[in-house]
Image (spheres, rainbow, N blue to C red):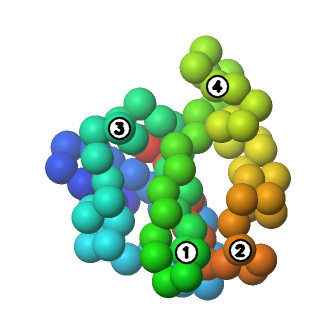
Amino acid sequence: MITIGDKNFELIENYRECFQKEEFESLFTEYFYEYDYIIGDYAYNKLRLKGFYEDTNKKAKDLNKISNKDKYLEENCAYNCKYFILKKI
């Protein structure tokens, strides 16, 4: 479990062992509070964050449903990039 402020997350995927709590904390803002998942990926050695919802969440659209994470990683991220997925608890 990872705690940032009063939010708890479970690290459910850590592809190529890239998760660094300090770097994540530096980019994590209130904007991400509403999301069920956060994907962090590296482009040009910089961490980018994107929020995703459970497929059943009313706010979910096709582009930010967690079931479409593979499509996001393939189409919006560098080939074979390092990434991690956090699930809000």
Pointer 1: what residue?
42
Alpha carbon of mark 3 to alpha carbon of mark 4: how far?
A: 15 Å
Query: Given this view, does label 1 or label 4 mark the residue nearer the observer?
Result: 1
Would you place residue 70 above or below residue 20 in this image? above
Circle 1/circle 4 CB separation < 8 Å: no
Closer to the chain start, of discs 2 and 1, is 1
> Which label sits on residue 86?
none
Pointer 2: what residue?
78
Crowd band around label 3 with a 10 angstrom C-alpha radius: few (<14), some (14–19), many (20+): few
Q: What secondary structure is marked by label 3?
A: helix
**x and y percent of residue 43 in the render?**
57, 75
Closer to the chain start, of discs 2 and 3, is 3
Circle 4/circle 2 CB separation < 8 Å: no
Residue drawn at x 58%, y 20% as measured from the top left:
59
Query: Given this view, does label 3 or label 4 mark the residue nearer the observer?
Result: 3
Q: Is residue 24 left or right of residue 71?
A: left
Pointer 4: what residue?
60
Q: From the image, which quarter does the C terminus lie in? A: top left
The amino acid at mark 2 is Ala
Pointer 3: what residue?
31
Alpha carbon of mark 1 to alpha carbon of mark 4: how far?
A: 24 Å
Alpha carbon of mark 4 to alpha carbon of mark 2: how far?
A: 24 Å
Would you place residue 10 above or below residue 20 in this image? above
Q: What secondary structure is marked by label 2?
A: loop
Question: Which residue reaches farthest front?
Answer: 44
Alpha carbon of mark 2 to alpha carbon of mark 3: how far?
A: 24 Å
